[in-house]
Protein backbone atom coordinates (compact mmCIF):
# COMPACT_ATOMS: atom_id res chain seq x y z
CA UNK A 1 0.00 0.00 0.00
CA UNK A 2 2.80 2.42 0.90
CA UNK A 3 4.58 1.66 -2.36
CA UNK A 4 1.40 2.32 -4.32
CA UNK A 5 1.01 5.70 -2.65
CA UNK A 6 4.62 6.66 -3.29
CA UNK A 7 4.41 5.73 -6.97
CA UNK A 8 1.07 7.51 -7.40
CA UNK A 9 2.25 10.66 -5.61
CA UNK A 10 5.55 10.76 -7.50
CA UNK A 11 3.82 10.71 -10.87
CA UNK A 12 0.97 13.08 -9.98
CA UNK A 13 2.52 15.28 -7.29
CA UNK A 14 1.66 18.60 -8.94
CA UNK A 15 -2.09 18.05 -9.18
CA UNK A 16 -2.12 16.53 -5.68
CA UNK A 17 -0.18 19.43 -4.18
CA UNK A 18 -2.62 21.86 -5.76
CA UNK A 19 -5.52 20.05 -4.09
CA UNK A 20 -3.75 19.79 -0.72
CA UNK A 21 -2.94 23.52 -0.67
CA UNK A 22 -6.55 24.41 -1.44
CA UNK A 23 -7.72 22.12 1.36
CA UNK A 24 -5.36 23.92 3.75
CA UNK A 25 -6.50 27.37 2.56
CA UNK A 26 -10.13 26.42 3.17
CA UNK A 27 -9.24 26.68 6.88
CA UNK A 28 -9.82 30.44 6.84
CA UNK A 29 -13.54 29.67 6.55
CA UNK A 30 -13.62 26.56 8.73
CA UNK A 31 -15.22 26.59 12.18
CA UNK A 32 -12.09 25.33 13.95
CA UNK A 33 -10.11 28.38 12.75
CA UNK A 34 -12.80 31.06 13.03
CA UNK A 35 -13.61 29.95 16.58
CA UNK A 36 -10.17 30.94 17.92
CA UNK A 37 -11.23 34.57 17.35
CA UNK A 38 -14.46 34.06 19.29
CA UNK A 39 -13.44 35.90 22.47
CA UNK A 40 -12.29 38.91 20.43
CA UNK A 41 -15.55 38.98 18.49
CA UNK A 42 -17.65 38.80 21.67
CA UNK A 43 -15.74 41.66 23.27
CA UNK A 44 -15.63 43.89 20.17
CA UNK A 45 -19.32 43.53 19.32
CA UNK A 46 -20.72 43.05 22.87
CA UNK A 47 -22.09 39.62 21.99
CA UNK A 48 -22.97 36.80 24.34
CA UNK A 49 -22.03 33.20 23.55
CA UNK A 50 -25.51 32.66 22.19
CA UNK A 51 -25.42 35.90 20.22
CA UNK A 52 -22.14 35.04 18.55
CA UNK A 53 -23.39 31.51 17.83
CA UNK A 54 -26.57 32.85 16.24
CA UNK A 55 -24.60 35.34 14.14
CA UNK A 56 -22.31 32.58 12.93
CA UNK A 57 -25.22 30.24 12.26
CA UNK A 58 -26.99 32.87 10.16
CA UNK A 59 -23.97 33.25 7.92
CA UNK A 60 -23.56 29.48 7.75
CA UNK A 61 -27.15 28.76 6.69
CA UNK A 62 -27.16 31.49 4.04
CA UNK A 63 -23.88 30.20 2.61
CA UNK A 64 -25.39 26.72 2.33
CA UNK A 65 -28.28 28.08 0.29
CA UNK A 66 -25.86 29.83 -2.07
CA UNK A 67 -23.51 26.88 -2.36
CA UNK A 68 -26.00 24.66 -4.18
CA UNK A 69 -25.94 27.18 -7.04
CA UNK A 70 -22.39 28.53 -6.85
CA UNK A 71 -20.74 25.12 -6.70
CA UNK A 72 -22.08 24.16 -10.13
CA UNK A 73 -20.31 27.07 -11.80
CA UNK A 74 -17.04 25.13 -11.79
CA UNK A 75 -18.51 23.10 -14.67
CA UNK A 76 -18.77 26.19 -16.87
CA UNK A 77 -15.23 27.55 -16.58
CA UNK A 78 -11.67 26.39 -16.03
CA UNK A 79 -10.51 25.23 -12.61
CA UNK A 80 -7.84 27.95 -12.66
CA UNK A 81 -10.33 30.77 -13.22
CA UNK A 82 -12.80 29.34 -10.71
CA UNK A 83 -10.05 29.01 -8.08
CA UNK A 84 -9.11 32.67 -8.48
CA UNK A 85 -12.74 33.72 -8.05
CA UNK A 86 -13.04 31.66 -4.86
CA UNK A 87 -9.76 33.06 -3.53
CA UNK A 88 -10.87 36.65 -4.09
CA UNK A 89 -14.17 35.89 -2.37
CA UNK A 90 -12.44 34.38 0.65
CA UNK A 91 -9.86 37.18 0.86
CA UNK A 92 -12.65 39.76 0.70
CA UNK A 93 -14.38 37.96 3.57
CA UNK A 94 -11.22 38.15 5.69
CA UNK A 95 -10.97 41.89 5.01
CA UNK A 96 -14.64 42.34 5.89
CA UNK A 97 -14.05 40.63 9.24
CA UNK A 98 -11.15 42.99 9.91
CA UNK A 99 -13.13 46.17 9.18
CA UNK A 100 -16.47 45.14 10.70
CA UNK A 101 -17.92 47.77 13.01
CA UNK A 102 -21.25 46.12 13.75
CA UNK A 103 -22.38 42.56 14.35
CA UNK A 104 -24.48 42.69 11.17
CA UNK A 105 -21.31 43.35 9.17
CA UNK A 106 -19.74 40.44 11.03
CA UNK A 107 -22.65 38.19 10.02
CA UNK A 108 -22.13 39.17 6.37
CA UNK A 109 -18.41 38.44 6.77
CA UNK A 110 -19.25 35.03 8.25
CA UNK A 111 -21.46 34.34 5.23
CA UNK A 112 -18.62 34.97 2.79
CA UNK A 113 -16.09 33.13 4.99
CA UNK A 114 -18.24 30.02 5.10
CA UNK A 115 -19.13 30.18 1.41
CA UNK A 116 -15.60 30.81 0.20
CA UNK A 117 -13.74 28.67 2.73
CA UNK A 118 -15.47 25.52 3.91
CA UNK A 119 -17.82 25.70 0.93
CA UNK A 120 -16.21 26.59 -2.38
CA UNK A 121 -12.49 26.19 -1.62
CA UNK A 122 -13.04 22.64 -0.37
CA UNK A 123 -15.45 21.98 -3.23
CA UNK A 124 -12.87 23.12 -5.79
CA UNK A 125 -10.11 20.94 -4.32
CA UNK A 126 -12.22 17.78 -4.13
CA UNK A 127 -14.00 18.21 -7.46
CA UNK A 128 -10.83 18.99 -9.43
CA UNK A 129 -8.99 16.06 -7.83
CA UNK A 130 -11.77 13.52 -8.36
CA UNK A 131 -12.11 14.56 -11.99
CA UNK A 132 -8.38 14.26 -12.57
CA UNK A 133 -8.18 10.75 -11.07
CA UNK A 134 -11.55 9.00 -11.54
CA UNK A 135 -9.97 5.53 -11.26
CA UNK A 136 -7.77 6.43 -8.29
CA UNK A 137 -10.08 8.85 -6.50
CA UNK A 138 -9.62 7.12 -3.15
CA UNK A 139 -5.85 7.53 -3.07
CA UNK A 140 -5.95 11.04 -4.50
CA UNK A 141 -8.60 12.36 -2.12
CA UNK A 142 -6.87 10.74 0.84
CA UNK A 143 -3.61 12.46 -0.04
CA UNK A 144 -5.02 15.96 -0.51
CA UNK A 145 -6.91 15.63 2.79
CA UNK A 146 -3.50 15.80 4.46
CA UNK A 147 -3.47 19.49 3.57
CA UNK A 148 -6.38 20.16 5.89
CA UNK A 149 -4.94 17.93 8.62
CA UNK A 150 -1.64 19.83 8.59
CA UNK A 151 -3.51 23.14 8.65
CA UNK A 152 -5.59 22.01 11.63
CA UNK A 153 -2.38 21.50 13.56
CA UNK A 154 -0.71 24.79 12.55
CA UNK A 155 -3.26 27.46 11.68
CA UNK A 156 -4.99 27.90 15.08
CA UNK A 157 -1.64 28.35 16.83
CA UNK A 158 -0.48 30.83 14.19
CA UNK A 159 -3.79 32.68 14.35
CA UNK A 160 -3.72 33.03 18.12
CA UNK A 161 -0.10 34.21 18.05
CA UNK A 162 -0.87 36.89 15.46
CA UNK A 163 -3.90 38.14 17.38
CA UNK A 164 -1.97 38.33 20.65
CA UNK A 165 0.88 40.34 19.14
CA UNK A 166 -0.80 42.33 16.36
CA UNK A 167 -4.47 42.49 17.29
CA UNK A 168 -7.33 40.53 15.79
CA UNK A 169 -8.18 43.05 13.06
CA UNK A 170 -4.61 43.14 11.76
CA UNK A 171 -4.46 39.35 11.94
CA UNK A 172 -7.52 39.01 9.71
CA UNK A 173 -6.06 41.49 7.23
CA UNK A 174 -2.96 39.30 7.10
CA UNK A 175 -5.21 36.27 6.59
CA UNK A 176 -6.57 37.91 3.43
CA UNK A 177 -3.05 38.30 2.08
CA UNK A 178 -2.24 34.71 2.97
CA UNK A 179 -5.23 33.49 0.96
CA UNK A 180 -4.09 35.33 -2.17
CA UNK A 181 -0.46 34.29 -1.70
CA UNK A 182 -1.43 30.69 -1.00
CA UNK A 183 -3.64 30.38 -4.07
CA UNK A 184 -0.95 32.00 -6.22
CA UNK A 185 1.44 29.27 -5.13
CA UNK A 186 -1.15 26.50 -5.48
CA UNK A 187 -1.96 27.45 -9.07
CA UNK A 188 1.69 27.06 -10.02
CA UNK A 189 1.15 23.31 -9.58
CA UNK A 190 -2.16 23.01 -11.43
CA UNK A 191 -1.47 21.42 -14.83
CA UNK A 192 -2.75 23.59 -17.68
CA UNK A 193 -3.28 20.63 -20.00
CA UNK A 194 -6.91 19.54 -19.96
CA UNK A 195 -8.09 22.42 -17.76
CA UNK A 196 -11.26 23.38 -19.57
CA UNK A 197 -14.97 23.74 -18.93
CA UNK A 198 -16.94 20.50 -19.13
CA UNK A 199 -20.24 22.25 -19.83
CA UNK A 200 -21.41 25.09 -22.03
CA UNK A 201 -23.90 27.77 -21.08
CA UNK A 202 -25.99 26.40 -23.92
CA UNK A 203 -26.22 22.98 -22.29
CA UNK A 204 -29.74 22.22 -21.17
CA UNK A 205 -31.02 18.99 -19.63
CA UNK A 206 -33.08 16.91 -22.02
CA UNK A 207 -36.63 16.12 -21.02
CA UNK A 208 -36.74 12.72 -19.41
CA UNK A 209 -32.98 12.67 -18.80
CA UNK A 210 -32.52 10.72 -15.58
CA UNK A 211 -29.45 12.71 -14.58
CA UNK A 212 -31.33 15.97 -14.97
CA UNK A 213 -33.88 15.09 -12.31
CA UNK A 214 -33.88 17.05 -9.09
CA UNK A 215 -31.21 15.63 -6.83
CA UNK A 216 -33.45 15.73 -3.79
CA UNK A 217 -35.75 13.21 -5.51
CA UNK A 218 -32.88 10.89 -6.44
CA UNK A 219 -33.03 7.70 -4.37
CA UNK A 220 -29.26 7.23 -4.50
CA UNK A 221 -28.76 10.52 -2.72
CA UNK A 222 -31.69 10.14 -0.33
CA UNK A 223 -30.42 6.78 0.93
CA UNK A 224 -26.83 7.93 1.46
CA UNK A 225 -27.29 11.51 2.67
CA UNK A 226 -28.27 10.66 6.29
CA UNK A 227 -25.00 8.76 6.67
CA UNK A 228 -22.86 11.37 4.93
CA UNK A 229 -24.27 14.20 7.08
CA UNK A 230 -23.89 12.31 10.35
CA UNK A 231 -20.21 13.13 10.80
CA UNK A 232 -20.39 16.91 10.22
CA UNK A 233 -23.44 17.18 12.48
CA UNK A 234 -22.16 15.10 15.38
CA UNK A 235 -18.50 16.12 15.37
CA UNK A 236 -19.20 19.85 15.02
CA UNK A 237 -21.81 19.74 17.77
CA UNK A 238 -19.60 17.99 20.31
CA UNK A 239 -16.57 20.08 19.39
CA UNK A 240 -18.58 23.28 19.82
CA UNK A 241 -19.80 22.19 23.25
CA UNK A 242 -16.52 20.63 24.37
CA UNK A 243 -16.22 22.90 27.42
CA UNK A 244 -19.71 21.92 28.58
CA UNK A 245 -18.92 18.26 27.90
CA UNK A 246 -15.81 18.47 30.07
CA UNK A 247 -17.85 20.10 32.82
CA UNK A 248 -20.58 17.46 32.71
CA UNK A 249 -18.06 14.62 32.65
CA UNK A 250 -15.84 16.11 35.34
CA UNK A 251 -12.84 16.32 32.99
CA UNK A 252 -10.14 18.96 32.96
CA UNK A 253 -10.55 21.07 29.82
CA UNK A 254 -6.85 20.52 29.07
CA UNK A 255 -7.60 16.81 28.69
CA UNK A 256 -10.11 17.57 25.96
CA UNK A 257 -7.80 20.07 24.28
CA UNK A 258 -4.93 17.57 24.23
CA UNK A 259 -7.21 15.00 22.62
CA UNK A 260 -7.49 17.20 19.53
CA UNK A 261 -3.91 16.27 18.67
CA UNK A 262 -4.91 12.62 18.64
CA UNK A 263 -7.91 13.49 16.48
CA UNK A 264 -5.78 15.31 13.88
CA UNK A 265 -3.09 12.62 13.71
CA UNK A 266 -5.53 9.72 13.42
CA UNK A 267 -7.64 11.55 10.84
CA UNK A 268 -4.56 12.17 8.69
CA UNK A 269 -3.35 8.57 8.90
CA UNK A 270 -6.81 7.12 8.27
CA UNK A 271 -7.37 9.41 5.26
CA UNK A 272 -4.23 8.07 3.61
CA UNK A 273 -4.79 4.45 4.59
CA UNK A 274 -8.35 4.23 3.32
CA UNK A 275 -7.62 5.50 -0.21
CA UNK A 276 -6.25 2.29 -1.78
CA UNK A 277 -8.97 0.25 -0.05
CA UNK A 278 -11.68 2.40 -1.62
CA UNK A 279 -10.04 2.08 -5.04
CA UNK A 280 -9.79 -1.71 -4.66
CA UNK A 281 -13.22 -2.70 -3.33
CA UNK A 282 -15.26 0.37 -4.27
CA UNK A 283 -16.90 3.04 -2.08
CA UNK A 284 -20.30 1.31 -2.04
CA UNK A 285 -18.80 -1.67 -0.20
CA UNK A 286 -17.57 0.56 2.64
CA UNK A 287 -20.67 2.74 2.79
CA UNK A 288 -22.55 0.73 5.48
CA UNK A 289 -19.39 0.39 7.61
CA UNK A 290 -17.72 3.79 7.80
CA UNK A 291 -19.99 5.12 10.57
CA UNK A 292 -19.44 2.19 12.93
CA UNK A 293 -16.47 3.85 14.71
CA UNK A 294 -18.65 6.94 15.11
CA UNK A 295 -21.42 4.85 16.65
CA UNK A 296 -18.95 3.24 19.06
CA UNK A 297 -17.58 6.68 19.99
CA UNK A 298 -21.05 7.90 20.88
CA UNK A 299 -21.79 4.72 22.83
CA UNK A 300 -18.71 4.95 25.06
CA UNK A 301 -19.18 8.70 25.49
CA UNK A 302 -22.75 8.14 26.60
CA UNK A 303 -21.97 5.35 29.06
CA UNK A 304 -18.51 6.14 30.50
CA UNK A 305 -17.24 9.27 32.24
CA UNK A 306 -13.59 8.34 32.92
CA UNK A 307 -11.07 10.90 31.56
CA UNK A 308 -9.46 8.31 29.25
CA UNK A 309 -12.68 8.31 27.22
CA UNK A 310 -11.83 11.78 25.86
CA UNK A 311 -9.01 10.65 23.52
CA UNK A 312 -10.79 7.36 22.78
CA UNK A 313 -13.96 8.98 21.50
CA UNK A 314 -11.93 11.57 19.60
CA UNK A 315 -9.90 8.85 17.86
CA UNK A 316 -13.00 6.88 16.92
CA UNK A 317 -14.67 9.99 15.51
CA UNK A 318 -11.51 10.83 13.57
CA UNK A 319 -11.58 7.42 11.89
CA UNK A 320 -15.17 7.86 10.71
CA UNK A 321 -14.56 11.44 9.60
CA UNK A 322 -11.53 10.38 7.56
CA UNK A 323 -13.42 7.48 6.00
CA UNK A 324 -16.45 9.64 5.24
CA UNK A 325 -14.62 12.58 3.70
CA UNK A 326 -12.58 10.38 1.37
CA UNK A 327 -15.36 7.92 0.60
CA UNK A 328 -18.09 10.46 -0.19
CA UNK A 329 -16.56 12.10 -3.26
CA UNK A 330 -15.45 8.72 -4.64
CA UNK A 331 -19.00 7.49 -4.09
CA UNK A 332 -20.51 10.37 -6.07
CA UNK A 333 -18.15 9.59 -8.94
CA UNK A 334 -19.28 5.95 -8.94
CA UNK A 335 -23.00 6.70 -8.61
CA UNK A 336 -23.32 9.81 -10.79
CA UNK A 337 -20.15 10.04 -12.91
CA UNK A 338 -17.58 12.82 -13.18
CA UNK A 339 -19.82 14.99 -15.37
CA UNK A 340 -22.43 15.28 -12.60
CA UNK A 341 -19.85 15.52 -9.80
CA UNK A 342 -19.94 19.30 -9.29
CA UNK A 343 -23.75 19.36 -9.18
CA UNK A 344 -23.91 16.54 -6.65
CA UNK A 345 -20.98 17.71 -4.53
CA UNK A 346 -22.23 21.30 -4.25
CA UNK A 347 -25.64 20.09 -3.08
CA UNK A 348 -24.17 17.64 -0.58
CA UNK A 349 -21.64 20.21 0.65
CA UNK A 350 -24.51 22.62 1.25
CA UNK A 351 -26.18 19.94 3.36
CA UNK A 352 -22.97 19.47 5.32
CA UNK A 353 -22.70 23.20 5.99
CA UNK A 354 -26.29 23.26 7.25
CA UNK A 355 -25.67 20.20 9.43
CA UNK A 356 -22.52 21.66 10.95
CA UNK A 357 -24.32 24.95 11.59
CA UNK A 358 -27.45 23.37 13.06
CA UNK A 359 -25.87 20.96 15.53
CA UNK A 360 -24.40 23.54 17.96
CA UNK A 361 -27.79 25.25 18.19
CA UNK A 362 -29.80 22.04 18.55
CA UNK A 363 -27.46 20.53 21.12
CA UNK A 364 -27.37 23.81 23.02
CA UNK A 365 -31.16 23.92 23.19
CA UNK A 366 -31.23 20.33 24.46
CA UNK A 367 -28.66 21.22 27.13
CA UNK A 368 -30.82 24.18 28.17
CA UNK A 369 -33.77 21.77 28.37
CA UNK A 370 -31.85 19.61 30.85
CA UNK A 371 -30.75 16.85 28.48
CA UNK A 372 -27.02 16.20 29.11
CA UNK A 373 -24.57 15.55 26.31
CA UNK A 374 -24.19 11.93 27.45
CA UNK A 375 -27.83 11.27 26.62
CA UNK A 376 -27.47 13.13 23.35
CA UNK A 377 -24.48 10.94 22.51
CA UNK A 378 -26.61 7.82 22.90
CA UNK A 379 -29.21 9.34 20.59
CA UNK A 380 -26.49 10.04 18.04
CA UNK A 381 -25.36 6.41 18.33
CA UNK A 382 -28.84 5.20 17.41
CA UNK A 383 -29.00 7.66 14.51
CA UNK A 384 -25.69 6.52 13.01
CA UNK A 385 -26.80 2.88 13.11
CA UNK A 386 -30.08 3.69 11.37
CA UNK A 387 -28.29 5.81 8.76
CA UNK A 388 -25.84 2.97 8.10
CA UNK A 389 -28.69 0.51 7.64
CA UNK A 390 -30.29 2.75 5.00
CA UNK A 391 -27.16 2.56 2.85
CA UNK A 392 -27.39 -1.24 2.54
CA UNK A 393 -29.85 -0.87 -0.32
CA UNK A 394 -27.34 1.22 -2.27
CA UNK A 395 -24.59 -1.33 -1.59
CA UNK A 396 -26.57 -4.36 -2.69
CA UNK A 397 -28.14 -2.97 -5.85
CA UNK A 398 -26.99 -1.09 -8.89
CA UNK A 399 -27.75 2.61 -9.21
CA UNK A 400 -30.45 1.90 -11.80
CA UNK A 401 -32.20 -0.63 -9.56
CA UNK A 402 -32.23 1.76 -6.61
CA UNK A 403 -33.80 4.50 -8.70
CA UNK A 404 -36.42 2.15 -10.15
CA UNK A 405 -37.39 0.82 -6.70
CA UNK A 406 -38.08 4.35 -5.49
Image (cartoon, rainbow, N blue to C red):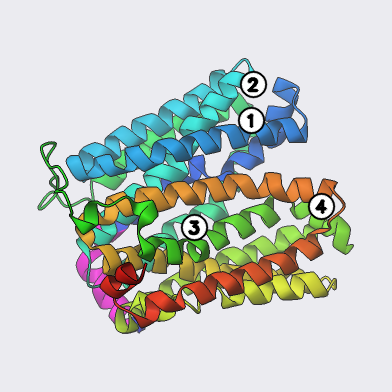
- In the image, residue 149 sits, relative to residue 97, either above or below, namely below
> Which numbered disc covers residue 150?
3
Mark 1 = which residue? 55
The label nearer to you, 2 versus 3, is 2
Residue for point 49% across, 40% down: 28
Residue for point 36% across, 65% down: 220
Mark 1 or mark 4: name the one nearer the start of the chain.
1
Which is the main secondary structure of the residues drawn in magenta? helix
Quick check: can you spot residue 38? Answer: yes
The local secondary structure at tag 1 comes to: helix
Quarter the C terminus occupies: bottom left
> Which numbered disc covers residue 103?
2
Distance between the alpha carbons at the discs numbered 4 and 2: 25 Å
Of residue 265 and residue 125, the one placed in the foreground of this image is 125
Q: Is residue 146 left or right of residue 251?
A: left
Question: CB atoms at circles 1 and 4 under 8 Å apart?
Answer: no
Residue for point 27% across, 56% down: 341
Amino acid sequence: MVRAYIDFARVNWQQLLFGALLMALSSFGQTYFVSVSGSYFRKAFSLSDGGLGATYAAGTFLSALTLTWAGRLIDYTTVRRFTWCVALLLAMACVLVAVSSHFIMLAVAFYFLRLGGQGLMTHTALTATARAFPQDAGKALGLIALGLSVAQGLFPIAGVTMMEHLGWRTAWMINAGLVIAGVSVALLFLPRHGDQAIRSRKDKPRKGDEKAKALWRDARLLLTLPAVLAGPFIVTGFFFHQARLAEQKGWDISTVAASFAAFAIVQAVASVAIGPIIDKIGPKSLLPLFLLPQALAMLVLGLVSAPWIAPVYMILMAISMALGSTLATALWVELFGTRELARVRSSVEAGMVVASGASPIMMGLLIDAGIPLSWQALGCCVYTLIASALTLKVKRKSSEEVVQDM
